[in-house]
Structure formats: C-alpha cells, structure tokens
Amino acid sequence: MQDRSCYHCGEPVPTNVDITSELDHQTRSFCCIGCQAVALTISGAGLDNYYQFRTKNAEQASDLSDQQEKYALYDEPSVQEKFCSYEGNSASATLLIKGITCAACVWLIEKHLEKIDGIQEVRVNLSTHRASITWDTNTLKLSDLFFAIDAIGYHAEPWKANRAAQQQQKESHTALIRLGIAGIGMMQVMMMANALYFGHYTGIDKSYEAFIRWASLFLSTPVVLYSAFPFFNAAIRDLKTKHLTMDVPVSIAIALAYSSSIWATFNGAGEVYFDSVCMFTFFLLLGRYFEMKVRHQNSQVTNDLIGLMPNSTLVYTDGEYKVTPTEQIKVGDRILVKAGHTIPSDAKVIEGTADVDESALTGEYLPVRKKIGDFVMGGTTCLDHPIEIEITTIGHQNTLNLVVELMNKAESNKPRIARIADTIASRFVAAVLITAVSVWGTWMFIDPDKAFWIALSVLVVTCPCALSLATPTAITAATSSLKRSGLIITSTHVLEGLPTITDILFDKTGTLTEGKLSISDIDIPSHLPESEALALAARLEAASEHPIARAFPTTNQPAQDIEITPGGGLSGTVDGKTLYIGHSQFIQEKTSINEVVLPDSHNWVVLADGQQVLAFFKVEDTLRADAKEAIQALRQRKINLHMLTGDRSQNAEDMARTLDIEHVHSGLTPQGKLDQLSKLHTQECRTLMIGDGINDIPVLASAGISIAMNEATDLAKTKSDMILMNGQLNAINNAFTIAEQCRKIIKQNLGWALIYNLIALPLAATGFIPPWAAAIGMSASSLVVVLNALRLRNI
C-alpha cells in the first residue's frame, strides 16, 4: 500500500490531494506542490542520499520562504559531508558560481561575501568560475552563503565534477545556439546593409530603402532579444547591486544602437545601425565562446580526476560479494577489486598482491606493487591480480578528493599582481562610461553625424577582461602542468616565489632517500655462516615494529620471549638460546661484552649472544634513483644547496659528497633545523625547504616555500605549499621551469592588455574604429591572453 505521508516533510497527505513523482525508482507522494518542487530540486542536484541519511523530516515547503526552501538543504550534515571539509570551527567548500561574465563579477562576489560576519576567506577563479570559501561554523550557516550569493544575482551550487561537466555541456550548447543565431542574423543584415550603402552612392527608391530597413529590423531583433540576452541580464543584475561590470557598457551600446535604429526605421530618416548591432553581438559572443571552451578545458583536469571513481563496487555482505553503489560504502567495508577494476576509496590491502596504476594521481606511470598491509588510493587501478581491501576513508577525506580540493584552492588563490589587476578592472568600467560620454559630447561639436557611432565604439573597444584574465588563466594552466609532473600546489605564491629562490634545503631521510632501509653489508667476526646470522636476526626483528626491522627478511618463525628496549634494541630466545640485536651501546649494557668495536662509522646493527658479537649489519637508506640528476639540474640554476638531517653517522657526509651538496648539517633536532633556516633568513636568503611532510612540519611551515615528499596518506595533515605525489625529484626542477615561464607569460599578458587599451581607446575616440571592428578588438584582446597562457600546458 502506498505511503500517504509526504515524502519530503512527513506530514499526512490530504485525501483530496494526489501529487506524486518518480524518485529513486519509486512513486513518492507529496502534500503540496512546494514539497514536490523541493524534492525534485534535491534529486536533480544529485543529492538523493539526503533522504536516506537525514535525521528528521524537512519543514513543509509552504512554511519556508523561497530562499530558505532552496538552500536549507545545505545545512544538513549528511549533505555537507559530500563537499565540505572541516578543521576545528572552520569549514571550507568549493562552489560553482553561475552568471560570472568578467573580472568585475569576481570582484563583486568576493567583496560582497567578505563583508559577511563569519567569512574567513573567499577566492573566486575567473577562469573556472569556482569559488573556494572558508567560514566560521559557529557564526555562519552554509545556507547563508548561498543566500548571499543569490542576493546579488548569481547562483551557486556545490562543485561536483559530474555536475560541473553536465553544466559545462549545457552552457556550451546554449552558447553555440546564441552564437549561431547571431551569426545568421549578422550575415543576412550585412547583405541588407550593403544594399543600403550602394544605394546611398548610386541612388535607391525610398520604398526599397524602407523595405530593407524593416527587413533588417526583423532579422536583427532575435539577435538582440536572444543572442544578446546574457549581456542585458548581467547588466540589469549589476545595476541592481550598484556595481559596474563590462556587461553594462556593452548592453548600453547594443541598446542605444538598436533603439536609435528602430526610431530611424519608423520615421524613415536618420541612420540605422542594425548591421553593427549584429556584428558586435556576434563577435563578442564568439570571443566569449572561445574563452568558455578554454575554461572548460582547464577545469577538465579535476573533472577527469573525479571521474576516475567507479559507480559501483563489490562489497562483502552476508557471506558474499554484492554489487553496491560506491556512494553507499562505509569505513571498514571489505571490497573485492578485480584485475582491471578501479579501487573505489582509500583502503588497505587485506588479501592478495597486485600491481596498481597510480599515474592519474602521482604522475608516475610505472605500476606500484601492493601487498597485504599496504595503502591503496581511491581512483587507482588494479592491473593484474584481484585483491581484497578494507576501506579506511570515504567521501571528502579521500586522497582523490583532497587532491582536487588542493588544486581548486591553488587555482583560486591570487598573487599580489592579480589582486592589483582586479582592482584596476573593477574601476575601469566607470572610466569607460565617463570617457564615452565625453567623446560623444566632443564629437557633437566636431561632427554630430559621427558622435553616436564613435561613442559606441569607445564603449565596446575598451576591455578590462584581458587585464583580469592575464593572471588566472596562466595560474590555471601552470597548475595543470605541475599536476602532470606529480606536483600539487596549495598556494599560488609558489609560482611567484620559485624564480627568486636562492637556497634549497633538503631533509635526507625520505626526501633524498627512499625512506626504506635495507642491509647494504654484513660483517661476520664469528664463525657463524652469513646466511644463518641473517636468519637469526630476522627471527628477532620479526617481533619489532621499528623501521629498521623492515630491512631484514620476513619470517614465519619469530623468536620467543621478546623484550624490547625502546631506542636500544631487543632480546629474544631462538632455539633455547638468548640473543640480542640493536645498537652497540645496548649490546654492551645487556651482555658481558665490554666493548663493541664497529667496522666503521656508519650505521651498524649488532647481533650478539651473551658472550660475543655474532654479526654486524650495515643498515642504510636507498638513495632515490633520480636524486643525483635532480641535484645537478638545480646546481645549474646557481642555487645554494643544503642538507639538514638528524642522522649523526658518516652516512650524511657520504651522501652529500655523492650528490655534490656543499652544505651539510647533521645531527639536527627539529629546533636545530629551524635555527639553520633562521640563519639563512637573517642573511636575506629566499628559501625552499623540501621534507617528508610529517617530521619536518615546523621547518616546512617556516620556509619561504615548502615542498612535502608525501605518498598521499598525510595530505590532510601537511601544511606545505606543494606536495610531491610521485617522489620524483626531477619534478622540482620542472617546477622552477614552469614557474619562470608562468611569470613571463603573466607579464606578457598584462603588457598586452595595457598596450591594447592604450592604443585602442584613442583610435576609437578619434573615429578610426567602427563599432563592429571594436567588438572584434575587444574579443581578440581576451583571446590573445587566454591562448598565450595555454602555452604553459605544453611544458
């Protein structure tokens, strides 16, 4: 029997009401049209899980204002966890903003939100139309943010790659239709205009002239009312909020030209500008269409990442594996991943061994062997053998989602030069309007017949868009290029700062080395065979969780009666005999051996019984394969290189000599590393610190720029400016190249934007640029900036 309570609010459905909709493959009943509309909105936004996880029924739609109806949903914790992240009382979210047309829109949104109590940070990206917002959850509700954005004429929704891709497809389709109508109208009206131009010189019958004018009016009207609608809509919004954007002068130009042409057509006297109206509507739309396609291309990197997640997976339930939607998996679920299938979320391997392709996240195209106990990332692909995994994180805390969030944050951050450019652009429009009025007034004295169309040209030709696009397009392209190298940037001051670096400081363990200890030499002072000595040591170390223990072979016959001395070593019984393994001092303290003489000054692990040393094992970390090549490339940049390490052994000096690092500081505590960094800062050095992202957090946070060597499990903890996902040190040199080129392109773009406006404005004001050419110039100016920035994607 069908449930007669309202699916949305839970209130009883009146017997005389029959309002239903098909939701989640079932017929749902509603008490009123308002509840039905809200439910359909929720479902259309892909948030059907709201009804599954909500803790109480929603308020009846008729009891809410229109805005509350629309946005109260986003205050539900079960909804927020899909796209929000939290740190203490602060929450962050990435939103997709609809209605942005130029830099002034970005400025307006940022300034409007920054005035709201509780907002901690707002960054809107003109290139991708995404906003990264951080707010105080004790002061502000998320629904308040949506309402505030809606109040100034824009529409926000949570950024989700699949929704963003659908929106982009819809946006592209609509823009193409508007452009096509404008193009057809332009061609037809231009043919009519040519007849009028020829008739002006050769003579034309008044009836034919009137017919052509009326036909031009008929053909240009769809162009103005439909194709140019986005300009008028945005201009009305901006005037309501008392802020000027470039859509205002464009709309004024189109409206004046169109209305004056209608007047001339009805009165049969004066000039008509239908051809100019259609032409600069077409060329403006064409320019924006190309900008839109580039913007979609730039955002495709993050869309592709989210698209890696599978729609369903095999979850162990009731003694068998069942196909389950990925969105429904939980922490602790046991998942079967078959060969060729994608891992649905961050997890650890509990059964099986397989090669995993992590290239989409790390940039490293060689597969990584994963065995029991290893961490695997959601979005990576199991290549050869099936494995069973246990889910460790879901939703927003997944490595994949964290990478996307970091990329969005980096693209939304603005360098100082971009903020200056945005400020100039926001005041530029008012200057354009004042200039156009001044030019019109001047030409009314010089030649009244030319005053109108010259003023139109001034309104259209000047463009602050190129000025504001100069930096964000370059940053977005550079961020994508760095991602392909395996580097994720979390702050765009990196792109400004890298070219100025004078000193690079490397941590040793886990940075210059793999962070995986191995036995490089065995010294046997007794008559014990080497293989037997290694087997005995392995049985002792089998009970230890210390990183050194991983250097020894695994065994299924661990020693008995294990006693561990933290920081020293351990003892245990093997075949009835007590053995000891650890540092030399530990051996001296636990046995009757008075003095343990090590073979040399390197790191040696000592194996002994109660009376004598049985074996020495030299344990060393493996140098990264590309470390020497990377160091040589950085030395060619004339940068001072330093190694900071807590290692007191000869290993640090030997490694520095191998890599040709001139400054070595060994035996350092975390405070000692900070002191070394401070010394460089007092000498006005600009520093880059490269560490493992965990033990080096204090010194990473204090450096001018920091890079964390990370395998992605600690992304949520690190405070570094960049994260090296694949461990390839050569990517750091590539980052310098990209940053240098990015700075060069930003300067080129800003130079072009300024030169264009300085040249175009006087030419338009003196009558050398007709309105249709002004539209081409305005669009071309922005396109030059965007296409120049795209060169960064080829590095």
Image (tube, grey):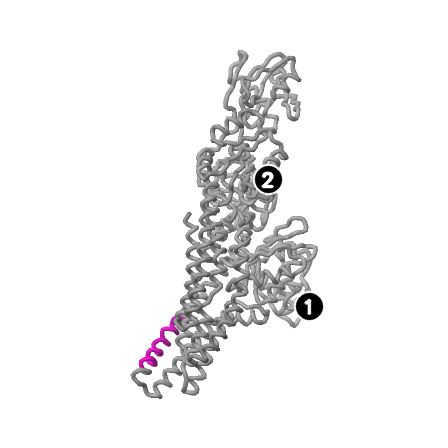
Image coords of residue 233 (percent x, y): 52, 71
Taking the magenta stretch, the answer to whether it contains residue 49 is no
| Residue type (three-letter) at the residue carrying disc 1 | Asp
Residue at 59% x, 53% y is: 82
Q: Secondary structure at mark 1?
A: helix
Dot 2 alpha-carbon crowd within 10 angstroms: few under 14, some 14 to 19, many 20 or more = few
Q: Quadrant of residue 213?
A: bottom left
Residue that extends furthest to the right in the rendered view of this protein = 138
**Which label belongs to residue 524?**
none
Q: Which residues are magenta?
A: 182-198
| Residue type (three-letter) at the residue carrying disc 2 | Thr
Image coords of residue 487 (percent x, y): 50, 44
* Front position in the image: 325 or 541: 541
Q: Is residue 463 visible?
A: yes
- For marks 1 and 2, the one nearer the N-term is 1
Taking the magenta stretch, the answer to whether it contains residue 197 is yes
Q: Quadrant of residue 613?
A: top right
Magenta-drawn stretch, dominant element (helix, strand or loop): helix
Residue at 51% x, 46% y is: 379
Q: Is residue 202 above or below residue 161?
A: below
The residues tagged by marks 1 and 2 sit, at their Cα atoms, a distance apart of: 63 Å
* Front position in the image: 261 or 383: 261
Q: Is residue 323 visible?
A: no
* Residue position for label 1: 63
**Quadrant for the N terminus in the image:** bottom right
Classify residue 93 as left or right of residue 341: right
Image coords of residue 676 (percent x, y): 59, 35
Classify residue 14 as left or right of residue 741: right
**Which label belongs to residue 682?**
2
Q: Secondary structure at mark 2?
A: helix
